[in-house]
Amino acid sequence: MSPLVARPVFTKTGWSRWNEPHIRDAVLLMVFALVTYAAADVYELPPYLLQFALDHPEWELDDLVFVVFILSAAVMTYGIRRYRDVVRENRARIAAEEHARNLALHDPLTKLPNRRFFEERLAANLQAAGAGKRLAVLMLDLNGFKAINDIHGHVAGDKALSEFARRASALLGRDAFLARIGGDEFSIMMPSISSVDEAADLAARIQETVAEPFVVGHATVRLGVGVGIAVAPDDGTRADELVSRADRALYRAKATRPSSARFFEPEMDARIERRVQIERELRAAVEFDSITPHFQPVVSLDGNRIIGFEALARWESADLGSIPPAEFIPVAEETGLIVPLGELLLRRACLEAKSWPKDLTLSFNVSAVQLYDPTFGLRVLAILAQTGFNPRQLEIEITEKALVANIAIAGKVIDQLRQAGVRVALDDFGTGYAALTQLLSLHLDKIKIDRRFVSHLGEGEDNRAIVRAILCLAKGVGLTTTAEGVEDQGQLAYLKASGCEERQGYLFGRAIPAAEIPALLKSRPWNSAVA
Ligand code: C2E
Ligand code: CA
Ligand code: CA
């Protein structure tokens, strides 16, 4: 709608109409015409025109001149008005464009530049950077922000973000550029630093200011910030390169300690490259079923008897060689490949274990991701039915961390499996900070004491006290105990004296292929050396 149409010209009366430019123009022109008419004097015309008028009195040239004069005045007024309108429209258009560009390049909440603006500015600065000039990119990621949003609501979360933006902006040097590039992610460009210490110093000061409590509404909350830093030209000369390397440094910083700062190091690239390779190879390995279970013996209290085996995944990749499960299981978990992989391994393990003596147990590891699926119990039972393996010979090992991650679903899955006769062990006990009451509310059969406590048994009273306490607790609530990672006679002697029922470790044997099990079982007393 044009501004002229929008104006209610005809509803106005009196002086208010004076402000309407067209009314004003018409009135001024009329006044001008009256004054000109009154003052007009044909004898004041230039002599040649005067003579012409006198020669032709019937043409009433004085009136004609007057009309021409008034018309030119009107045309001039119109011209000036149009010119002013065009200038005003132009200004409004430029302002609107500026506003739209501003909106497109800024984050509406914190008013900081957004990712697009940051990347544009970074690219421009890199292009303009002269030789020998260093430019730093800092990637920042807040810790604890999600909890503020969840506990205190989005308004509080927004306040915390704005306050962070305010505090961080106050610390920036004259030419540093701060942007909000995601939910709780920010980035800073320092276009010209003389040494990397300047970037480290800014990161430290931002961490300090973030450590101060944030007041959001009625609550006082705490945040932390992880920082990753990449510096041009050493770490790259392209904007995308620097951003992704600062990101990798941030990822590594957070993996060590969530609120720490780290510079990019070339080995981080190698690590990511390896991760990408493993993921690619893992997909193929799952598809072609080339990861197999090996079996590590679990030994009885008297040390004379193998009472079962724990299935441990083994992968010999054609391209990457032997890859330990500690490296590929986390990748399988992150990518969801653990679900098909877990099923393949369980099927194979059950088929192998079917030929073992009926009093031997097969222990099988389950990841948290598998437990997220409420039908997991049914899937296990289906595999048992398909392979014909006795559920009473199967023991599922669930880590403490996996249990805590999803205790409600885990509880249901455990009950389902136990009803079918499957036993359930709590793996890596003592590493997951689970509340004891939580763990005891689940119906477990066994606790496996983590290797780190066992391996340090000889080194001090603390670990011995922890192991004693776990054994005592387990006995109290009627759970069996297995000590993992027994490597020497000293550890074995202590465990025997403390009444730990089952043991596992290199002292009794490493994981072996299924084909070697019959020979191992026949070679009794296979462990007479250590019994
Ligand atoms: P875990 O379940 O705690 O398995 C025990 C790990 O300790 C195994 O490592 C085993 O080889 C190692 N080990 C056993 N005895 C000793 C010892 O005396 N000394 C030392 N230093 N180590 C010992 P592995 O096979 O590398 O497996 C590492 C982890 O990977 C396992 O820890 C388990 O959490 C996971 N994992 C292995 N196979 C599977 C699987 O099929 N599915 C799932 N979800 N996780 C698996
Ligand atoms: Ca285990
Ligand atoms: Ca374990």
Image (spheres, helix red, strand yellow):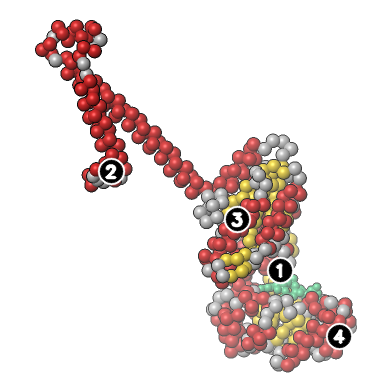
- In space, the residues marked 1 and 2 are separated at their CA atoms by 84 Å
Tell me if mark 3 has few (under 14), some (14-19) or many (20+) residues whose alpha carbon lies within 10 angstroms of its own. Answer: some
**Front disc: 1 or 2:** 2
Horizontally, residue 287 falls left or right of residue 470, namely left
Residue highlighted by disc 3? 165
- In space, the residues marked 1 and 3 are separated at their CA atoms by 42 Å
Is the C-beta separation of discs 1 and 3 under 8 Å? no
Using the image, tell me which numbered label, if any, was put on residue 494.
Answer: 4
Using the image, tell me which numbered label, if any, was put on residue 395.
Answer: none
Is the C-beta separation of discs 4 and 3 under 8 Å? no
**Front disc: 4 or 2:** 2
Residue highlighted by disc 1? 325
Horizontally, residue 529 falls left or right of residue 39, namely right
Residue at the image point whose x is 24% and y is 13% from the top: 44
Q: Nearer the viewer, residue 251 or 99?
A: 99
**Front disc: 1 or 3:** 3
Location of residue 304 (image quadrant): bottom right
Label 1 secondary element: helix
Q: Position of residue 271 (x, y in %)?
A: 71, 57
